[in-house]
Amino acid sequence: MRRDYTRSPPEGGAARAYCEQQSSDFYVADNRSRMVLSNSKPGIFNPLTLLQQTRLAYSRVWHQISASTPHATLSTQPSVTPPSLGRLASRIAVLLMGKHKPTFDPSTDCGDYVVVTNCAALHTTGNKKWRKNYYRHNTRPGSLKTVTMDVLMEKHGGSEVLRKAVSGMLPKNRLRDKRLARLKAFEGEAHPYKQNVIRFGGKVVGSEGWQKAVEAIRNTDKDRL
């Protein structure tokens, strides 16, 4: 027997009985953009719950990273030096692309937002700050311009240096500009996105005591299960 998935379901108590009879089927009501579902039985498949879980999986999170604070995994000496420019840029590129998520797809823009503070104190190793060159050309003969990293930081700040490093690590496709636009770099500590940054137990990631807050949440979840 072939069922008609376009007709409107009955109203009132008849609708509940009808949905229970049809088990996991769902019907689209006329002139509506929502699905009419039955939640009376716990074992019935609910597509609306699946849509909510999918929306949660693709939601964007705001991450905050300090360019001048030693990092547990990005710094070569976690308790001494801050993360270098290359390590910091590679981690930011992963967050912007969403490669840390199980829902990652190369053709889907599923990355997060990244807020980087203290870009004026970017850490570089060796003589890169004086020997690293940036080039630009306007396609006319003799118009090649060269500028070193220290001059670029003096003119446009460390945020521009970080943005160029991250841009070079992103795939060269149509999603590149959209992903790079979610990078918010600032020279100091102040930024207007403090209310958006993800927190664990009230602690911002990277701040003092945030790892203990994460462990407390994990232990609470284990006890709950």
Image (spheres, rainbow, N blue to C red):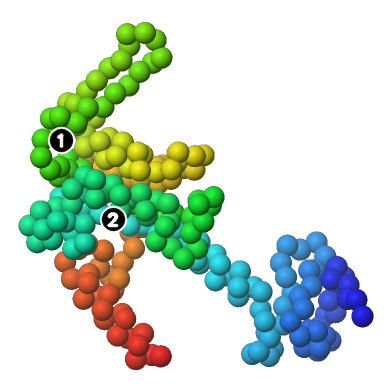
Give coordinates of residue 50: x percent, y percent.
60, 73
Q: Residue at x 81, y 88 (%)?
A: 21
Look at the picture and state if 50 lies above or below 86.
below
**Residue 129 visible:** yes
Query: Position of 110 compared to 113: left or right?
Result: right
Give coordinates of residue 53: x percent, y percent.
54, 71
Hey, which quadrant is residue 215 in on the image?
bottom left
Residue type, label 2? Gln
Residue type, label 1? Lys
Q: Residue furthest left?
A: 80
Q: Give the secondary structure at mark 2.
A: strand
The residue identified by callout 1 is: 128
Q: Are marks 1 and 2 in contact (CB under 8 Å)?
A: no
Mark 2 neighbour density, 10 Å: few (under 14) some (14–19) many (20 or more): many
Task: Give residue 64's mark.
Answer: 2
Nearest to the observer: residue 61 or residue 173: 173
Q: Nearer the viewer, mark 1 or mark 2?
A: 1
Counting residues from the start of the chain, the first of labels 1 and 2 encountered is 2
Query: Position of 60 compared to 50: left or right?
Result: left
